[in-house]
Amino acid sequence: RCMLFLVGMCTMALVFVVILLTAEEVGADHSVEIYLFLLSWIGYPLVYLFMLLPMPFWLPDLLFAPLDVFAKAVFGLWVAQKAWFP
């Protein structure tokens, strides 16, 4: 379980490097949004680590909910808005 977590964190770090280097290389206009989206991704492993502590069964869902709303819904709506109304 710990090894899988470490592999996932290394993979996430590699994806972050690729995304950030690509954004810098092409001179992305929306660098702030890219950084905010990547910061929301950091929350998922933090919640996972927090789940290792004893807690009520509903607390992980309460912690994952804002991450899901921002990382999926808000970011998806933002991308759609930028695609249709540049």
Image (tube, helix red, strand yellow):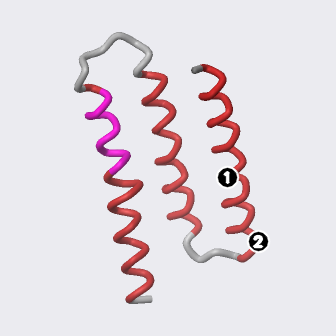
Residue found 63% across the figure and 44% down from its top: 12
User: Residue 62: x and y, percent?
Assistant: 26, 34
- Choose the circle earlier in sequence order: 1 or 2: 1
> Going by the picture, which residue comes out furthest to the bottom?
85
Task: Judge whether 75 appears above or below 12 on screen.
Answer: below
Q: Quadrant of residue 5?
A: top right
- The magenta-colored residue range is 60-68
Depth check: 75 or 32 in front? 75
Q: Dot 2: what SS?
A: helix
Residue found 70% across the figure and 38% down from its top: 10
- Marks 1/2 in contact by CB < 8 Å: the verdict is no
Q: Quadrant of residue 85?
A: bottom left
Kind of residue sitting beneath label 2: Glu
User: Residue 1: x and y, percent?
Assistant: 57, 20
CA neighbours of label 1 inside 10 A, class few (<14), some (14 to 19), many (20+): few
Which label lies toward us, 1 or 2?
A: 1
Kind of residue sitting beneath label 1: Val
Residue 15 marker: 1
How far is the residue under mark 1 from the one under mark 2? 15 Å
Left or right of 21? Residue 73 is left
**Is residue 82 part of the magenta span, yes or no?**
no
Task: Judge whether 71 appears above or below 77 on screen.
Answer: above
> Going by the picture, which residue comes out furthest to the top?
54
Q: Quadrant of residue 55?
A: top left
The kind of secondary structure the magenta stretch mainly shows is helix
Residue found 55% across the figure and 72% down from its top: 30
User: Residue 54: x and y, percent?
Assistant: 35, 10
Q: Dot 1: what SS?
A: helix
**Is residue 62 part of the magenta span, yes or no?**
yes
What residue is disc 2 on?
A: 25
Task: Judge whether 1 appears above or below 54 on screen.
Answer: below
